[in-house]
Image: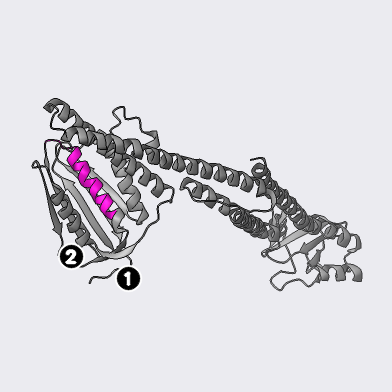
Amino acid sequence: MKSFRKYISKYLASFVGLVLILLAINILAFGWTFHGVMTKDYGDFSPQNMLDTTAASAALDGISDEASAQLRRSHIWAVYLDMAGNAAWELDMPDEIPEHFTIQDVALFAKGYLAGYPVFIRNTADGMLILGYPKGSYMKLQSNYFSLRAIKTMPFFVMGIFVADLAILFLAYSFSKRKILKNTEPIITSIEGLGSGKPTALSIPGELSGVANSVNKAADILNRQNQARANWISGVSHDIRTPLSMIMGYSKLIADEDSLNDDVRKKAEIISQQSVKIRELVQDLNLVSQLEYEMQPIHKAAIRIASLVRTYVADLLNGGLPDQYSIDVDISANAEITTFECDARLISRAINNLVQNSIQHNPDGCDIMLSLDRTEDSVILYAADNGIGLSAEKLKKLRERPHYIESTDDRLDLRHGLGHILVQQIVKAHNGTMQIESENQKGFKVTLIFPRRPDDSCM
């Protein structure tokens, strides 16, 4: 965990550092840009300084060649009015500017503009100096002036900086995300594998090596625990067989003894029947454990599933089905000749568990129906009865059944729960799904859906 925090902290620190660098660059960019603007508009070549420089060399007979050259370099035109409002001289003055001005004219352009040109004026001892700047170069107010170029450029400049910052941050985010996902994806996959019991062996260099080692240790512990649990169940199942066989054998001998009274014989038969149930429970528990921990080999072969269902029903009827029960088979025409790649022994076991559940949970009898259908991509097996069914609460518990090791059934009646756990494990081993439907006093129905492979044929 410490190495993982260090890994995340490293990337967070890098991101914060990038943000600080961008902030510093933005400050420098703004400073450099507006330093240039301020230098031009308020520095040595500002309108105010240009007025001062030009007025110092201006007179009624003209200005110096140096002042003229400086004005032309700055694209500034000039005119000098005498006391009568006449142009004593002019420098590059536009044609639309008159050569005589009345006092009203002077009052108007003194506000800042003359024929659309921003103008700056300076009174001298002999007259008035007027400097005119290109149209659209300055916005003048009564108290100050501002560069229109700067004002027009400002939104684009700010937007450009903002977009550039977003682009850099997005690239940094994408790069960091891709790198983090690349480094953490094996860990996430391994942790998900732990949940499904898959073996895990991580090898990650760098900061996350400690996390990988922790995941490997956890996987090793879980694997050893699962192996120990499976071995314990297998060992207990094996150890129970011998005494259980003796109990079943002796109870059969007692039940067949002619000299015993009916009460003792009945008790012996009960012992024999319950011993069979115990044997079946142990077999189911052992098979569930083997399937869950992938210790049960799956021997798949292409079989006609309709024949398997009919064979099971025939064996059940030949073995003797109590009179209060009936079983029927409904196989659709398109499923009749369908072959299915599966382990026939396990599929038969699943069908038997479903049928036996219906029998054992309906002691007063019921009608059982096994149905088989086929779609384009699935084989569907239904097992239903019209018995007592389950309440909504019990159905919810069955759908959310706990692990068989965690059962808290005080009556040790695991047949319904464990039987369906086994069916679900068999279905899972064939990449299928199981659905349970039931209503109180309206029967019980289980649907097994198995995916068909492209090479599963219809013979």
Q: Which residue is mark 2?
A: 336
Tell which circle, 2 or 1, labels the residue nearer the N-terminal end.
2
- For the residue pair 146 and 395, the one nearer the viewer reads as 395
Secondary element under disc 1, as helix, strand or loop, is loop
Answer above or below: position of 153 versus 200.
Answer: below
The disc label shown at residue 359, or none: none
Secondary element under disc 2, as helix, strand or loop, is helix
* Residue at screen point 15% across, 45% down: 385
Note whether residue 414 is visible.
no
* Residue at screen point 75% across, 57% down: 33
- For the residue pair 218 and 412, the one nearer the viewer reads as 412
Q: Decide: few, some or many residues near mark 2? Use Cα within 10 Å; few <14, some 14-19, many ≥20.
A: some
Quadrant showing the N terminus: top right
In the rendered image, residue 363, in percent from the top left (x then y), is placed at: 15, 36
* Residue at screen point 32% across, 30% down: 409
- For the residue pair 10 and 20, the one nearer the viewer reads as 10
Answer above or below: position of 55 versus 425.
Answer: below
Which portion, as a residue range, is magenta? Answer: 347-364
Task: Tally the marks.
Answer: 2
Q: Main secondary structure of the magenta part?
A: helix
In the rendered image, residue 79, in percent from the top left (x then y), is placed at: 80, 66
Q: Amino acid at mark 1?
A: Asp
Residue 396 colored magenta? no
- Locate residue 154: give its quadrant: bottom right
The disc label shown at residue 455, or none: 1
Residue 350 colored magenta? yes
Q: Amino acid at mark 2?
A: Glu
Q: Residue furthest left?
A: 323
In the rendered image, residue 418, in percent from the top left (x then y), is placed at: 31, 40
